[in-house]
Amino acid sequence: MKQLFLMTLLMFYSLKALAQQDTLVPKANQRLDFATTYFELGMGFSPAFTGKQLVNNQSIPFEHSASANPYFNWGGFHFWGHGEFYVSFPLGQLDFSPNDKNKAKLTHSVATGARFFPWKYQPNKLRPYVGVSWSALDFKQKIENEDNPVLSKDFMWVPEAGLLYGHGSFSLRVGVSYFHDNKWTYPVSKTRLEEITTPRFRVQAGLVYSFEGSKNNSAELNKKWNSYKTISKPGAGATHFGDFFMGVGPSTSFSLAKSNYNQALLPYLKNKMTSEPYFDIALGYQFNKAGMFCALSFRNPIFTTSGYGTNQTIKKTSLAVEVNKFLTDYSGFVPYVGLNVAYDHLMYTEETTQGSKKQTFAKIEPGLTIGWDILPGKTDEYLILRTNLRWYPLSSFEIEGKKFDFSQLEYNLIQLVFYPGRYLRWKKTKTKR
Protein backbone atom coordinates (compact mmCIF):
# COMPACT_ATOMS: atom_id res chain seq x y z
CA MET A 1 0.00 0.00 0.00
CA LYS A 2 2.86 2.39 0.80
CA GLN A 3 4.31 1.66 -2.66
CA LEU A 4 1.02 2.62 -4.28
CA PHE A 5 0.79 6.00 -2.57
CA LEU A 6 4.47 6.77 -3.13
CA MET A 7 4.01 5.93 -6.80
CA THR A 8 0.93 8.15 -7.02
CA LEU A 9 2.62 11.08 -5.29
CA LEU A 10 5.63 10.68 -7.56
CA MET A 11 3.35 10.74 -10.59
CA PHE A 12 1.61 13.91 -9.40
CA TYR A 13 4.97 15.58 -8.67
CA SER A 14 6.24 14.56 -12.10
CA LEU A 15 3.44 16.57 -13.73
CA LYS A 16 5.05 19.79 -12.61
CA ALA A 17 8.52 18.61 -13.57
CA LEU A 18 7.38 17.61 -17.06
CA ALA A 19 5.96 21.07 -17.59
CA GLN A 20 9.43 22.57 -17.15
CA GLN A 21 10.98 20.43 -19.92
CA ASP A 22 10.66 22.05 -23.32
CA THR A 23 11.29 18.70 -25.02
CA LEU A 24 8.07 17.28 -23.51
CA VAL A 25 5.75 20.26 -23.91
CA PRO A 26 5.08 21.82 -27.35
CA LYS A 27 5.81 25.51 -27.43
CA ALA A 28 2.39 26.09 -29.00
CA ASN A 29 0.82 24.42 -25.93
CA GLN A 30 -1.82 22.55 -27.90
CA ARG A 31 -3.94 21.19 -25.03
CA LEU A 32 -6.04 18.98 -27.30
CA ASP A 33 -2.89 17.23 -28.60
CA PHE A 34 -2.04 16.13 -25.06
CA ALA A 35 -3.72 12.70 -25.33
CA THR A 36 -4.90 10.20 -27.94
CA THR A 37 -7.22 7.27 -27.13
CA TYR A 38 -6.51 3.73 -28.33
CA PHE A 39 -7.80 0.15 -28.27
CA GLU A 40 -5.45 -2.83 -28.40
CA LEU A 41 -5.96 -6.54 -28.99
CA GLY A 42 -3.04 -8.81 -28.20
CA MET A 43 -1.61 -11.95 -26.67
CA GLY A 44 0.84 -12.68 -23.85
CA PHE A 45 2.98 -15.84 -24.07
CA SER A 46 4.35 -17.74 -21.02
CA PRO A 47 6.85 -20.66 -21.21
CA ALA A 48 6.33 -24.09 -19.67
CA PHE A 49 7.21 -24.65 -16.00
CA THR A 50 7.29 -27.39 -13.38
CA GLY A 51 4.32 -28.12 -11.15
CA LYS A 52 3.96 -30.56 -8.26
CA GLN A 53 1.31 -33.01 -7.13
CA LEU A 54 0.92 -35.48 -4.29
CA VAL A 55 0.98 -39.18 -5.28
CA ASN A 56 0.99 -41.79 -2.49
CA ASN A 57 2.04 -39.04 -0.08
CA GLN A 58 5.06 -38.22 -2.28
CA SER A 59 5.60 -34.88 -4.05
CA ILE A 60 5.94 -35.64 -7.78
CA PRO A 61 7.07 -32.96 -10.29
CA PHE A 62 5.41 -32.67 -13.70
CA GLU A 63 5.38 -30.12 -16.52
CA HIS A 64 2.74 -27.44 -17.06
CA SER A 65 2.59 -26.53 -20.75
CA ALA A 66 3.37 -23.16 -22.26
CA SER A 67 0.32 -20.93 -22.55
CA ALA A 68 -1.05 -17.77 -24.14
CA ASN A 69 -3.29 -15.16 -22.55
CA PRO A 70 -5.28 -12.97 -24.98
CA TYR A 71 -6.11 -9.47 -23.75
CA PHE A 72 -7.97 -6.30 -24.68
CA ASN A 73 -6.51 -2.92 -23.69
CA TRP A 74 -8.20 0.47 -23.46
CA GLY A 75 -5.75 3.31 -23.05
CA GLY A 76 -4.24 6.49 -24.36
CA PHE A 77 -0.99 8.16 -25.33
CA HIS A 78 -0.40 11.15 -23.04
CA PHE A 79 2.12 13.95 -22.46
CA TRP A 80 2.28 14.60 -26.23
CA GLY A 81 3.45 11.06 -27.02
CA HIS A 82 5.86 10.58 -24.09
CA GLY A 83 3.49 8.70 -21.78
CA GLU A 84 0.92 5.94 -21.98
CA PHE A 85 -1.78 4.83 -19.52
CA TYR A 86 -3.97 1.79 -20.05
CA VAL A 87 -6.37 -0.73 -18.55
CA SER A 88 -5.96 -4.37 -19.62
CA PHE A 89 -8.86 -6.84 -19.63
CA PRO A 90 -7.89 -10.56 -19.71
CA LEU A 91 -9.75 -12.75 -22.20
CA GLY A 92 -8.90 -16.20 -20.86
CA GLN A 93 -6.02 -18.64 -21.36
CA LEU A 94 -4.97 -20.97 -24.18
CA ASP A 95 -2.77 -23.98 -23.38
CA PHE A 96 -0.26 -25.38 -25.89
CA SER A 97 -0.78 -28.96 -24.76
CA PRO A 98 -3.60 -31.48 -25.29
CA ASN A 99 -3.11 -32.77 -21.73
CA ASP A 100 -6.48 -32.24 -20.02
CA LYS A 101 -5.54 -34.00 -16.78
CA ASN A 102 -2.94 -31.57 -15.42
CA LYS A 103 -3.13 -27.88 -16.31
CA ALA A 104 -2.14 -24.58 -14.77
CA LYS A 105 -4.14 -21.37 -14.70
CA LEU A 106 -1.85 -18.32 -14.55
CA THR A 107 -3.89 -15.19 -15.23
CA HIS A 108 -4.07 -11.53 -14.29
CA SER A 109 -7.17 -9.83 -13.05
CA VAL A 110 -7.97 -6.52 -14.78
CA ALA A 111 -4.62 -4.66 -14.83
CA THR A 112 -3.64 -1.00 -15.06
CA GLY A 113 -0.32 0.22 -16.40
CA ALA A 114 1.81 3.24 -17.24
CA ARG A 115 4.61 3.49 -19.81
CA PHE A 116 7.24 6.10 -20.66
CA PHE A 117 8.66 6.83 -24.12
CA PRO A 118 12.08 8.59 -23.95
CA TRP A 119 11.49 9.62 -27.57
CA LYS A 120 7.87 10.56 -28.13
CA TYR A 121 5.66 8.18 -30.06
CA GLN A 122 5.22 9.15 -33.72
CA PRO A 123 3.85 7.25 -36.74
CA ASN A 124 6.44 5.56 -39.00
CA LYS A 125 9.06 5.51 -36.23
CA LEU A 126 10.18 2.64 -34.00
CA ARG A 127 9.96 3.74 -30.37
CA PRO A 128 11.18 1.94 -27.20
CA TYR A 129 9.33 2.23 -23.90
CA VAL A 130 9.58 1.15 -20.26
CA GLY A 131 6.73 0.87 -17.80
CA VAL A 132 5.00 -0.88 -14.96
CA SER A 133 1.59 -2.50 -14.54
CA TRP A 134 -0.27 -3.50 -11.40
CA SER A 135 -2.99 -6.06 -10.73
CA ALA A 136 -3.62 -9.36 -8.96
CA LEU A 137 -2.03 -12.51 -10.40
CA ASP A 138 -3.92 -15.80 -9.95
CA PHE A 139 -2.35 -19.25 -9.98
CA LYS A 140 -4.15 -22.58 -9.89
CA GLN A 141 -3.10 -26.14 -10.59
CA LYS A 142 -5.98 -28.02 -12.23
CA ILE A 143 -5.29 -31.68 -11.54
CA GLU A 144 -7.81 -34.36 -12.51
CA ASN A 145 -10.12 -35.46 -9.65
CA GLU A 146 -8.74 -32.80 -7.29
CA ASP A 147 -10.46 -29.64 -5.99
CA ASN A 148 -7.37 -27.42 -6.23
CA PRO A 149 -7.48 -23.88 -4.81
CA VAL A 150 -6.59 -20.61 -6.53
CA LEU A 151 -3.83 -18.49 -4.94
CA SER A 152 -3.32 -14.80 -5.65
CA LYS A 153 -0.55 -12.24 -5.45
CA ASP A 154 -2.61 -9.11 -4.82
CA PHE A 155 -1.75 -5.76 -6.34
CA MET A 156 1.46 -7.08 -7.90
CA TRP A 157 3.85 -4.62 -9.58
CA VAL A 158 5.16 -5.90 -12.94
CA PRO A 159 7.97 -4.00 -14.76
CA GLU A 160 7.85 -4.10 -18.55
CA ALA A 161 9.69 -2.88 -21.65
CA GLY A 162 9.06 -3.04 -25.36
CA LEU A 163 8.94 -1.50 -28.83
CA LEU A 164 6.10 0.22 -30.68
CA TYR A 165 5.90 0.93 -34.41
CA GLY A 166 3.00 2.85 -35.91
CA HIS A 167 1.64 3.65 -39.33
CA GLY A 168 -1.41 5.89 -39.61
CA SER A 169 -3.97 4.93 -36.97
CA PHE A 170 -2.45 1.46 -36.38
CA SER A 171 0.57 0.35 -34.35
CA LEU A 172 2.33 -2.94 -33.62
CA ARG A 173 3.62 -3.65 -30.12
CA VAL A 174 6.17 -6.22 -28.93
CA GLY A 175 7.05 -6.27 -25.24
CA VAL A 176 8.19 -8.32 -22.29
CA SER A 177 6.98 -8.33 -18.66
CA TYR A 178 9.11 -9.35 -15.66
CA PHE A 179 7.59 -11.12 -12.64
CA HIS A 180 10.04 -10.61 -9.78
CA ASP A 181 7.81 -12.50 -7.32
CA ASN A 182 7.36 -15.86 -9.04
CA LYS A 183 7.49 -18.31 -6.12
CA TRP A 184 4.28 -19.81 -4.72
CA THR A 185 3.80 -21.83 -1.55
CA TYR A 186 1.07 -23.95 -3.03
CA PRO A 187 -1.17 -26.40 -1.10
CA VAL A 188 -0.94 -29.78 -2.88
CA SER A 189 -3.29 -31.05 -0.17
CA LYS A 190 -5.12 -29.63 2.85
CA THR A 191 -2.07 -30.13 5.05
CA ARG A 192 0.92 -30.09 2.70
CA LEU A 193 2.53 -27.08 1.02
CA GLU A 194 5.07 -27.20 -1.81
CA GLU A 195 7.05 -24.41 -3.47
CA ILE A 196 6.27 -23.94 -7.18
CA THR A 197 8.13 -21.48 -9.39
CA THR A 198 6.21 -19.94 -12.27
CA PRO A 199 7.87 -18.17 -15.28
CA ARG A 200 9.65 -14.88 -14.64
CA PHE A 201 8.99 -13.50 -18.12
CA ARG A 202 5.96 -13.09 -20.36
CA VAL A 203 6.30 -11.92 -23.97
CA GLN A 204 3.42 -10.01 -25.53
CA ALA A 205 2.42 -8.82 -28.99
CA GLY A 206 -0.49 -6.57 -29.86
CA LEU A 207 -2.22 -4.52 -32.56
CA VAL A 208 -3.16 -0.96 -31.53
CA TYR A 209 -5.79 1.30 -33.09
CA SER A 210 -5.62 4.95 -31.94
CA PHE A 211 -7.94 7.88 -32.58
CA GLU A 212 -8.48 11.46 -31.50
CA GLY A 213 -11.77 12.09 -29.69
CA SER A 214 -11.40 15.53 -28.09
CA LYS A 215 -11.35 17.78 -31.17
CA ASN A 216 -14.88 17.14 -32.43
CA ASN A 217 -16.06 20.57 -31.36
CA SER A 218 -16.57 23.94 -32.95
CA ALA A 219 -13.46 25.91 -33.90
CA GLU A 220 -14.44 28.43 -31.20
CA LEU A 221 -14.58 25.80 -28.47
CA ASN A 222 -11.31 24.17 -29.58
CA LYS A 223 -9.64 27.58 -29.47
CA LYS A 224 -10.94 28.17 -25.94
CA TRP A 225 -9.72 24.79 -24.66
CA ASN A 226 -6.31 25.25 -26.27
CA SER A 227 -6.00 28.67 -24.64
CA TYR A 228 -5.63 27.18 -21.14
CA LYS A 229 -2.10 27.09 -19.74
CA THR A 230 -0.29 23.77 -19.40
CA ILE A 231 -0.77 23.94 -15.61
CA SER A 232 -3.92 25.78 -14.54
CA LYS A 233 -6.72 25.70 -12.00
CA PRO A 234 -9.38 23.04 -12.63
CA GLY A 235 -12.09 25.68 -12.22
CA ALA A 236 -10.55 28.22 -14.61
CA GLY A 237 -13.13 29.55 -17.04
CA ALA A 238 -16.08 28.09 -15.11
CA THR A 239 -19.33 29.98 -15.77
CA HIS A 240 -21.55 28.06 -13.32
CA PHE A 241 -21.22 27.52 -9.58
CA GLY A 242 -21.69 23.75 -9.82
CA ASP A 243 -23.23 20.75 -11.57
CA PHE A 244 -24.81 17.44 -10.58
CA PHE A 245 -23.32 14.27 -12.07
CA MET A 246 -23.86 10.51 -12.23
CA GLY A 247 -21.22 7.90 -12.95
CA VAL A 248 -20.71 4.18 -13.43
CA GLY A 249 -17.61 2.08 -14.05
CA PRO A 250 -16.03 -1.36 -13.53
CA SER A 251 -14.11 -1.94 -10.29
CA THR A 252 -12.06 -4.52 -8.39
CA SER A 253 -11.24 -4.73 -4.66
CA PHE A 254 -8.02 -6.12 -3.17
CA SER A 255 -7.44 -7.29 0.40
CA LEU A 256 -4.21 -5.74 1.66
CA ALA A 257 -3.49 -7.90 4.72
CA LYS A 258 -3.45 -11.62 5.47
CA SER A 259 -6.32 -13.17 7.39
CA ASN A 260 -5.29 -14.69 10.73
CA TYR A 261 -8.42 -16.82 10.55
CA ASN A 262 -7.47 -18.44 7.24
CA GLN A 263 -3.85 -18.85 8.25
CA ALA A 264 -4.86 -20.73 11.42
CA LEU A 265 -7.85 -22.79 10.24
CA LEU A 266 -7.88 -22.82 6.42
CA PRO A 267 -4.22 -22.53 5.33
CA TYR A 268 -4.98 -24.09 1.93
CA LEU A 269 -7.19 -21.12 0.93
CA LYS A 270 -6.24 -17.58 -0.03
CA ASN A 271 -4.95 -15.43 2.83
CA LYS A 272 -5.67 -12.26 0.86
CA MET A 273 -8.78 -12.13 -1.30
CA THR A 274 -9.56 -10.32 -4.54
CA SER A 275 -13.15 -9.53 -5.51
CA GLU A 276 -14.97 -10.47 -8.66
CA PRO A 277 -15.47 -7.45 -11.00
CA TYR A 278 -18.37 -5.19 -10.01
CA PHE A 279 -19.75 -1.73 -10.83
CA ASP A 280 -19.15 1.44 -8.87
CA ILE A 281 -22.26 3.65 -9.17
CA ALA A 282 -22.01 7.28 -8.08
CA LEU A 283 -24.24 10.35 -7.73
CA GLY A 284 -22.73 13.68 -6.81
CA TYR A 285 -22.31 17.41 -7.14
CA GLN A 286 -19.23 19.26 -8.39
CA PHE A 287 -18.40 22.75 -7.17
CA ASN A 288 -16.88 24.03 -10.40
CA LYS A 289 -15.24 27.23 -9.23
CA ALA A 290 -14.02 25.73 -5.94
CA GLY A 291 -12.46 22.74 -7.71
CA MET A 292 -14.01 20.02 -5.53
CA PHE A 293 -16.87 17.52 -5.56
CA CYS A 294 -19.02 15.45 -3.20
CA ALA A 295 -20.37 12.02 -4.12
CA LEU A 296 -22.46 9.13 -2.85
CA SER A 297 -21.05 5.82 -4.15
CA PHE A 298 -22.62 2.36 -4.12
CA ARG A 299 -20.51 -0.83 -4.45
CA ASN A 300 -21.33 -4.52 -3.94
CA PRO A 301 -18.17 -6.64 -4.42
CA ILE A 302 -18.14 -10.40 -3.81
CA PHE A 303 -14.99 -12.18 -2.59
CA THR A 304 -14.71 -15.96 -3.02
CA THR A 305 -12.08 -18.62 -2.47
CA SER A 306 -12.41 -22.39 -2.55
CA GLY A 307 -10.43 -25.61 -2.51
CA TYR A 308 -10.42 -29.18 -1.19
CA GLY A 309 -14.13 -29.15 -0.36
CA THR A 310 -14.22 -25.71 1.32
CA ASN A 311 -16.00 -22.63 -0.06
CA GLN A 312 -15.57 -19.21 1.53
CA THR A 313 -17.58 -16.16 0.41
CA ILE A 314 -17.78 -12.55 1.61
CA LYS A 315 -20.52 -10.35 0.14
CA LYS A 316 -20.06 -6.66 0.79
CA THR A 317 -22.74 -4.02 0.22
CA SER A 318 -21.37 -0.54 0.79
CA LEU A 319 -22.55 3.07 0.54
CA ALA A 320 -19.83 5.73 0.83
CA VAL A 321 -20.03 9.50 1.21
CA GLU A 322 -16.91 11.28 0.02
CA VAL A 323 -15.50 14.77 -0.44
CA ASN A 324 -12.65 15.25 -2.93
CA LYS A 325 -10.46 18.21 -3.85
CA PHE A 326 -8.78 18.66 -7.24
CA LEU A 327 -5.05 19.41 -6.93
CA THR A 328 -4.24 20.89 -10.34
CA ASP A 329 -5.00 20.61 -14.04
CA TYR A 330 -2.06 19.46 -16.12
CA SER A 331 -3.30 19.86 -19.69
CA GLY A 332 -6.48 17.87 -18.97
CA PHE A 333 -5.02 15.39 -16.47
CA VAL A 334 -6.63 16.41 -13.15
CA PRO A 335 -5.62 14.50 -9.97
CA TYR A 336 -7.59 14.76 -6.72
CA VAL A 337 -7.52 13.52 -3.11
CA GLY A 338 -10.27 13.23 -0.52
CA LEU A 339 -11.84 11.54 2.48
CA ASN A 340 -14.78 9.16 2.62
CA VAL A 341 -16.93 7.34 5.16
CA ALA A 342 -18.62 4.07 4.18
CA TYR A 343 -21.45 2.06 5.70
CA ASP A 344 -20.60 -1.60 5.03
CA HIS A 345 -22.88 -4.61 5.35
CA LEU A 346 -20.82 -7.83 5.22
CA MET A 347 -22.19 -11.35 4.87
CA TYR A 348 -19.66 -14.11 5.60
CA THR A 349 -20.36 -17.70 4.47
CA GLU A 350 -18.15 -20.76 4.93
CA GLU A 351 -19.14 -24.20 3.66
CA THR A 352 -17.18 -27.38 4.39
CA THR A 353 -17.87 -31.10 4.47
CA GLN A 354 -18.44 -30.72 8.23
CA GLY A 355 -21.13 -28.03 7.89
CA SER A 356 -21.53 -24.33 7.23
CA LYS A 357 -21.11 -20.98 9.00
CA LYS A 358 -22.93 -17.73 8.29
CA GLN A 359 -22.44 -14.37 9.96
CA THR A 360 -23.34 -10.79 9.12
CA PHE A 361 -21.66 -7.55 10.17
CA ALA A 362 -22.59 -3.88 9.86
CA LYS A 363 -19.75 -1.38 10.18
CA ILE A 364 -18.81 2.26 9.61
CA GLU A 365 -15.44 2.49 7.84
CA PRO A 366 -13.36 5.66 7.29
CA GLY A 367 -11.33 5.77 4.10
CA LEU A 368 -9.01 7.79 1.90
CA THR A 369 -9.68 8.49 -1.80
CA ILE A 370 -7.20 9.36 -4.54
CA GLY A 371 -7.89 9.60 -8.26
CA TRP A 372 -7.83 11.63 -11.44
CA ASP A 373 -10.14 12.97 -14.14
CA ILE A 374 -9.40 13.27 -17.86
CA LEU A 375 -11.06 16.51 -19.00
CA PRO A 376 -9.43 18.65 -21.68
CA GLY A 377 -12.53 20.86 -21.69
CA LYS A 378 -12.59 21.54 -17.93
CA THR A 379 -16.16 22.37 -16.79
CA ASP A 380 -17.48 22.62 -20.39
CA GLU A 381 -17.42 18.81 -20.78
CA TYR A 382 -20.58 16.86 -20.00
CA LEU A 383 -19.02 13.38 -20.39
CA ILE A 384 -15.66 12.59 -18.76
CA LEU A 385 -13.50 9.64 -17.65
CA ARG A 386 -12.63 9.24 -13.96
CA THR A 387 -10.38 6.79 -12.09
CA ASN A 388 -10.32 6.48 -8.30
CA LEU A 389 -8.93 4.32 -5.52
CA ARG A 390 -10.45 4.06 -2.04
CA TRP A 391 -8.38 2.73 0.84
CA TYR A 392 -10.02 1.26 3.96
CA PRO A 393 -7.15 0.36 6.34
CA LEU A 394 -9.25 -0.44 9.45
CA SER A 395 -11.80 -2.90 8.11
CA SER A 396 -11.91 -6.26 9.95
CA PHE A 397 -14.26 -8.70 11.70
CA GLU A 398 -14.00 -11.83 13.87
CA ILE A 399 -14.97 -15.44 13.18
CA GLU A 400 -14.89 -17.70 16.27
CA GLY A 401 -12.50 -15.35 18.04
CA LYS A 402 -10.05 -15.19 15.11
CA LYS A 403 -9.43 -11.86 13.39
CA PHE A 404 -10.28 -11.66 9.71
CA ASP A 405 -8.38 -8.59 8.48
CA PHE A 406 -10.43 -7.11 5.67
CA SER A 407 -8.48 -3.91 4.95
CA GLN A 408 -8.99 -3.18 1.26
CA LEU A 409 -8.14 -1.12 -1.74
CA GLU A 410 -11.13 -0.49 -4.01
CA TYR A 411 -9.96 0.26 -7.52
CA ASN A 412 -12.51 1.95 -9.80
CA LEU A 413 -10.83 1.47 -13.18
CA ILE A 414 -12.53 3.80 -15.66
CA GLN A 415 -15.75 5.46 -14.59
CA LEU A 416 -17.91 7.19 -17.19
CA VAL A 417 -19.27 10.38 -15.58
CA PHE A 418 -22.22 12.30 -17.07
CA TYR A 419 -23.26 15.89 -16.16
CA PRO A 420 -26.90 16.44 -17.25
CA GLY A 421 -26.84 20.21 -16.69
CA ARG A 422 -23.71 20.65 -18.81
CA TYR A 423 -25.25 18.53 -21.55
CA LEU A 424 -28.41 20.70 -21.62
CA ARG A 425 -26.29 23.87 -21.80
CA TRP A 426 -24.19 22.38 -24.64
CA LYS A 427 -27.33 21.31 -26.51
CA LYS A 428 -28.89 24.74 -26.10
CA THR A 429 -25.75 26.45 -27.40
CA LYS A 430 -25.53 24.05 -30.35
CA THR A 431 -29.20 24.70 -31.25
CA LYS A 432 -28.62 28.48 -31.34
CA ARG A 433 -25.88 28.00 -33.89
Image (cartoon, rainbow, N blue to C red):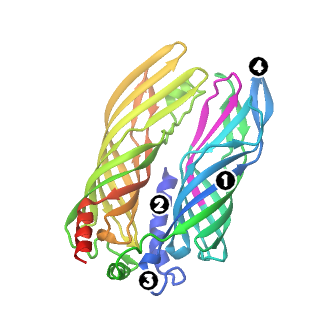
Disc 3 is placed on an element classified as loop
- Label 4 and label 1: CA atoms lie apart by 38 Å
Give the residue number, with chain letter if any, for mark 1: 43
Instruction: Decide if residue 392 is in sight here.
Output: no
Dot 4 and dot 2 residues touching (CB under 8 Å): no
What's the magenta region?
A: 132-153
* Residue highlighted by disc 2: 8
Image check: 213 left or right of 194? Answer: left
Amino acid type indicated by mark 1: Met
Which is in the foreground here, disc 3 or disc 4?
3
Query: In this view, which residue lies farthest toward the bottom?
Result: 27
x and y, in percent, of residue 83 in the image = 54, 69
Q: Amino acid at mark 2?
A: Thr
Label 1 and label 2: CA atoms lie apart by 28 Å
- For marks 3 and 2, the one nearer the N-term is 2
The mark found on residue 29 in the picture is 3
Mark before the other along the chain sequence, 3 or 1: 3
Q: Quadrant of the C terminus?
A: bottom left
Crowdedness near tag 3: few (<14), some (14–19) or many (≥20) residues, C-alpha within 10 Å: some
